[in-house]
Amino acid sequence: MQKVEEIRNFKGKTVATVHFDSRSGRYYIYDFLGKNLGYFDPKDARGKGRTYNFYGKIISTGNSLTSLIEDWD
């Protein structure tokens, strides 16, 4: 089961959505067009989790999914 959360800019426009995948425990982020920007895996890095970009490169330790959003307008 997936839970979806919308990320909105200050004007109220949806700029991204975060989907929680209960099977893997990961959080995936998609831009407003549906393009996958990356994911957060809370099980990595000794329980702190790691954020990965679309290509699988580690972006940070901890959840920084919103840093993957390029267009906030």
Image (cartoon, rainbow, N blue to C red):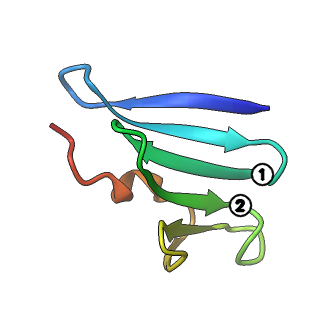
Q: At x 46% / y 59%, what residue is drawn?
A: 64
For the C terminus, give its image quadrant: top left
- For label 2, the residue is 42
Residue, far right: 23
Q: Are marks 2 and 1 in contact (CB under 8 Å)?
A: yes
What mark, if any, has residue 35 been given in the picture?
A: none
Asked which secondary structure carries label 2, the reply is loop
Instruction: Using the numbered discs, state the Cα–Cα distance from disc 2 to disc 1 in whole angstroms.
Output: 7 Å
Q: Nearer the viewer, residue 56 or 64?
A: 56
Q: Quadrant of residue 30?
A: top left
Q: Looking at the image, is mark 2 or mark 1 earlier in the sequence?
A: 1
Which residue shows up at 70% across the image and 77% down it? Answer: 45
Front tag of 2 and 1: 1
> Residue furthest toward the top?
12
Mark 2 neighbour density, 10 Å: few (under 14) some (14–19) many (20 or more): some
Q: Residue at x 71, y 60 (%)?
A: 42
Q: Position of residue 72 (x, y in %)?
A: 21, 41
Type of the residue with mark 2: Pro
- Report the residue at 25% width, 23% height from top: 13
With 13 as the anchor, is 54 left or right in this view? right
- Give, as a three-letter code, the residue at label 1: Gly
Q: Is residue 72 left or right of residue 38?
A: left
Q: Position of residue 23 (x, y in %)?
A: 84, 47
Query: In the rendering, at what x and y percent does residue 43 appear?
Result: 77, 66
Q: Is residue 17 above or below residue 46?
A: above
Task: Judge the density around disc 1: few (<14), some (14-19), many (≥20) Cα neighbours within 10 Å.
Answer: few
At mark 1, the secondary structure is loop
Rendered location of residue 9, percent (x, y)? 25, 31
In this figure, which residue is indicated by the disc labeled 1? 25
Q: Is residue 67 left or right of residue 52?
A: left
Residue 7 visible (yes or no): yes
User: Against 35, is 53 above or below?
Assistant: below
